[in-house]
Image (cartoon, helix red, strand yellow):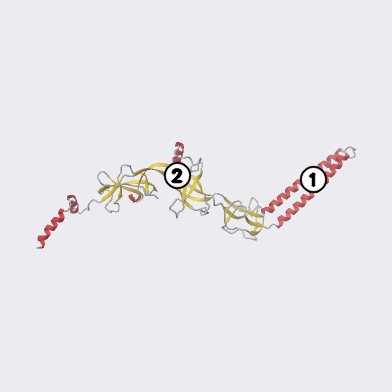
Amino acid sequence: MTRFFSLPLVAVAVAGLSFSTFGALAQGAPPAPPVTVAAPLARKVAQWDEYTGRFEAASHVEIRARVSGFIDKVAFTDGALVKKGDLLFVIDQRPYRIAVEAARADVAKAKAQVDVAQTDVGRANSLQQSHVLSQRDIDQRRATLNVAKATALAAEAELDTAELNLAWTEVRAPISGRISDKKVDVGNLISGGQAGATLLTTIVSTDPINFVFEASEADYVRYSRLAKEGARPSSREAPTPVQVRLSDKSQWDRTGAMDFLDNQVNPRSGTIRGRAVFANHDNFLTPGTFGRMRLFGGDIEALMVPDASIVADQARKIVMVVGPDSKVVGKPVTLGPIIDGLRVVRSGLSRDDKVIITGLANPFVRPGVQVVVQAGTIQLAATN
């Protein structure tokens, strides 16, 4: 009884399968998986080349005193922002005030000597007609006046030097920026001058701030050719736009411009040093911080595919396409950035390739497997 009714049921189930599917089941193979394919989207896009670099201060100053003496006062807070002209250190001013007073006394003495010499010359001139004085005496008095005037000028110069040294006892910030910690405490004796002067602290400017990076020789040659062809201005002649982001950011939220390109390629590394400048009004960017910068490299004709269509094969990136025989083929590609939700493919694809855009989640979709193809399209992400 059981055998009699089971045979028609089996016959009905088998009748519902196609011959190819039945053959696949008979051999233990799964049916051909369905996939959706589409041609890569061809579009002219702006090419941005990315570089890793480091922020550097536009100005870096080591603060050293021009005169020697004991530190009387430290007038700043370690690590604070200072403005140009702010008082930083005060050196014991007493010996320099005494030097100023002594110089003023020497000036007064020299002026008195000039007055006496001028009086003597005036008397000699009035007596010259009566021949009371010889010409030698007259010449001698005139020479004495000239010496007195020169001595007065020297005394005034000594006074200027003494006043300048007194002014230098107040060490002020030569630039605006962020100051480091003090290297010398109050009460210490420091050396001033041009050689062997004691380091007191350092200041680095913060706004604007530079970003220094190394570009490859190949990129440099490509930029040079673009500039020669008129497709992109040279960074030496125009401020080429650049964008930067920090390691914790995914958006390129700061915009700057190139302001320097070195004059030679480093023969050891095969790179050339470049520099961009960025506004830093919020003082958030700190010298020494690493960042990622992208540089405009001209417009290119690019092929774009969904990022989900790309799989990784060890160190390579592969795009799965369907060949004329409906079999999956993996094509190694060179990738670019994501623009409007699609990944730029620099090389490895052609306009006629049928890229798999859905169905890759099926574990049976792999190179060499025959698939059932459905047509689809690749579209840019919707923007508000």
In the image, residue 41 lies at what x, y percent? 34, 44
Residue under pointer 1: 148
Q: Amino acid at mark 2?
A: Phe
Crowd around label 1: few <14 · some 14–19 · many ≥20 (10 Å): many
Q: Verify CB contact (< 8 Å) between mark 2 and mark 1.
A: no
Residue 241 falls left or right of residue 171:
left
Question: For the point 86% across and 38% down, which residue is it?
Answer: 135
In the rendered image, the residue lying farthest to the bottom is 1
Residue under pointer 2: 296
Q: Looking at this view, is 196 or 177 the one in front?
A: 177
Q: Number of numbered discs present? A: 2
Q: Looking at this view, is 233 or 216 the one in front?
A: 233
User: Mark 2 or 1, which is nearer the eye?
Assistant: 2
Distance of mark 2 from mark 1, alpha carbons? 71 Å
Q: Earlier in the sequence, mark 2 or mark 1?
A: 1
Q: Looking at this view, is 373 or 88 the one in front?
A: 373
In the image, residue 338 lies at what x, y percent? 39, 48
In the image, residue 337 lies at what x, y percent? 40, 48
Q: Would you say residue 67 is visible in this rendering?
A: no
Q: Secondary structure at mark 2?
A: strand
Q: Would you say residue 9 is visible in this rendering?
A: yes
In the rendered image, the quadrant that contains the N terminus is: bottom left
Q: Secondary structure at mark 1?
A: helix
In the image, residue 75 lies at what x, y percent? 62, 58
Q: Amino acid at mark 1?
A: Ala
Crowd around label 2: few <14 · some 14–19 · many ≥20 (10 Å): some
Q: Is residue 1 above or below residue 332?
A: below
Q: Looking at this view, is 275 or 71 the one in front?
A: 275
Residue 143 falls left or right of residue 211:
right
